[in-house]
Image (cartoon, helix red, strand yellow):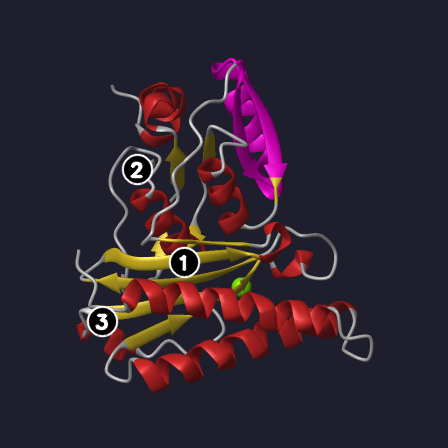
Amino acid sequence: MSAAPGDHALAARLADETGRLLLDLLNDPDGPQGWALEMAGDRQAHEFLVGELGRHRPADAVLSEEGRDDRRRLDADRVWILDPLDGSSDFGVSGSWSVHVALCDRGEPAAAAVAVPAWDTTFATDPAPVPTMCRVGRRRVVVARSRGYTDGRRLAERLDAEVVAMGSAGVKAMAVVRGEVDAYVHTGGLYEWDTCAPAGVALAAGLHVSCVDGAPLRFNNARPHTPGLVISRPDFADELLEALSPVSRRPRG
Ligand SMILES: [Mg+2]
């Protein structure tokens, strides 16, 4: 994978500024509330990102959760994959939302950033975050709130691990980077805008990133879908993938 000069910095700036724009919207006493706030956040963040990319990277393709899927991206090497507001149902409710900006080059994340405004932090690929690897004691694994019963129960049965749930794929992935948890597991399908920027940052930080069967993730697919995600401390990945193996391997015979 390769990024052009300035791609890392551009991804970081755009994620950071989008996070600030969203905080301003959230803190506007005359602004929209409830469902209208969520809608406004999605729209304003998308329009800002697409406008900036049109100005600074006019030749690149864009795939955004909030935009029309322009299929010309399938012929492009460089595609920006955006989730302008990940975890939008938590926007205005909790801090579990994030901004995802990733540049994908021929199927792999080349530059990426995830802004988590609740932590006042934007994680990027250069300089990459240095993961906190010093947790001791029982393993902690984060899963989606919607998958607490499936993923959470399976992991608790097969690993000596505490399973916690959080919103936003970006927040969960960056919780691994920060060392709050040892891994993030999602065995169901996700969209590429959920996974590309978190995967790019986690890879740059030296973490294990794969599908549930251990295969590497590929992006800019015709159907922009990721069939499951594991982001883990490298020294925990084998044990975790083994615990997940009945999910990913068909029984023989
Ligand atoms: Mg979104």
Residue carrying label 3: 74
Separation (CA) of disc 1 from disc 3: 22 Å
Split into 4 quadrants, where in the image is the C terminus? top left
Tell me the element at label 3: helix
Separation (CA) of disc 2 from disc 1: 15 Å
Mark 1 crowd level (few <14, some 14–19, many ≥20, 10 Å Cα)? many
Q: Quarter-wise, where is residue 132 in the image? A: top left
Relative image position of residue 82 (x, y in whole percent): 42, 66
Split into 4 quadrants, where in the image is the N terminus? bottom left
Relative image position of residue 134 (x, y in whole percent): 46, 22
Residue 9 counted in the magenta span:
no
Q: Which mark is residue 113?
A: 1
What's the residue at 72%, 68% (across, down)?
26
What's the residue at 61%, 31% (across, down)?
164
Tell me the element at label 2: loop
The magenta segment is 137-165
Q: Amino acid at mark 1?
A: Ala
Q: Which mark is residue 206?
A: 2
Placement of 8 over or under 239, stated as above or below: below
Q: Amino acid at mark 3?
A: Leu
Q: Earlier in the sequence, mark 2 or mark 3?
A: 3
Q: Is residue 212 left or right of residue 19?
A: left
Mark 3 crowd level (few <14, some 14–19, many ≥20, 10 Å Cα)? some
What's the residue at 30%, 33% (across, down)?
213
* Of 242 and 178, the residue lying toward us: 178
* Of 173 and 71, the residue lying toward us: 173
